[in-house]
Amino acid sequence: MEKHIKNMTLSSQRANISAYDLIDIVEKYNGVLIPAHAFTPHKSFYGNCAKSLKRIFKEKYEKIPAIELGLSSDTFLADKISELEEKTFLTNSDAHSLPKIAREYNKMKVEKISYKELMKAIRNEEERKIVCNYGLDPKLGKYHRTYCEVCNKRIEGNVPVTKCDSCDSRNVTMGVLDRIEIIRDKEKTKSPNFRPEYKYQVPLSFIPGLGTKTIEKLLSKFETEMNILHKISFDDIEAVCGEKIARNIIDAKSGNVKISAGGGGVYGKVEAKC
């Protein structure tokens, strides 16, 4: 890739090569190309580049087994696009944001831990499969709704929002929800039978009342954030950090919270109980 990227030490560098040609390089080294954050604005395939992956990859489209949804989308939204019905959906965190690893992840059915088994699960081969996707409620994502760069505000209103309702400017960062509404080709969401459950989770850092020290106490006791969000009981959490914070965590786990949607690079916010 040094032939196509000026500075290989920076993760944000532009590669002067088309995705159509890139897939050949990936395959040359026995890799698999999976578009990540597929609906995020600015640089992603669906978010900005095109309405269809098939138009980009042409006859090579069948070589792409999956797409990664990104924080501001989910299964329900992505399955409004018919060409994705045959693709596996993945939910993954950024590897360059170490504290945020596992805020989105996948549960897979495999026989052992290996690259070969991983690819069988992604391709739904020999009864290997993705069992569950874990991810944020899309409203918590940084690009869920359209954002006016002139007024510096998220734009409310019925989707799709393409301009500001205050200044009438089209200098906006398109929201994932709004973009999908524009490019969708299905009247209603209909997922294929192999599509796994999508479980929403609210990271501890998003939950009201949880500061760094409280989160550290919880992790010291229960080891992982996944344990706290999906396995540990109210009573056990209360014993560590008190009733109020324990109630906030349980409410977030059960979806009993109000979320102010994110946009323009700003995360959504958990406001209060319903």
Image (tube, rainbow, N blue to C red):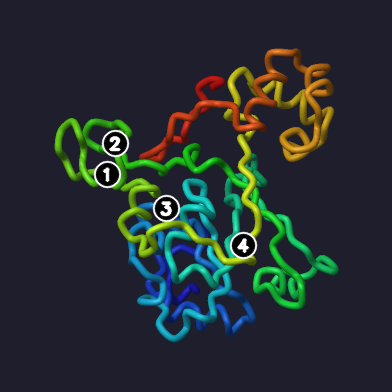
Question: What whole-number distance in Å separates the C-alpha atoms at marks 1 and 2?
Answer: 7 Å
Residue contact at pointers 3 and 1, CB within 8 angstroms: no
Q: Which residue is mark 4?
A: 195
Apparent side of residue 17 relative to residue 85 in the rendered image (left or right): left
Kind of residue sitting beneath label 3: Thr
Question: What whole-number distance in Å separates the C-alpha atoms at marks 3 and 1?
Answer: 15 Å
Disc 2 or disc 3, which is closer to the eye?
A: 2
Looking at the rendering, which quadrant does residue 167 occupy? top left
Kind of residue sitting beneath label 1: Val
Residue 40 marker: 3
From this view, report whether residue 9 is shown above or below residue 66.
Answer: above
Q: Secondary structure at mark 2?
A: loop
Question: What whole-number distance in Å separates the C-alpha atoms at marks 4 and 1?
Answer: 29 Å
Measuring from the top left, give residue 224's x and y in whole percent: 77, 38
Residue contact at pointers 1 and 2, CB within 8 angstroms: yes
Q: Secondary structure at mark 4?
A: loop
Kind of residue sitting beneath label 2: Gly
Residues packed near mark 1 inside 10 Å, few (<14), some (14 to 19) or many (20 plus): many
Whichever of callouts 4 and 1 sits on the residue coming sooner in the sequence is 1
Disc 3 or disc 4, which is closer to the eye?
A: 4
Kind of residue sitting beneath label 4: Arg
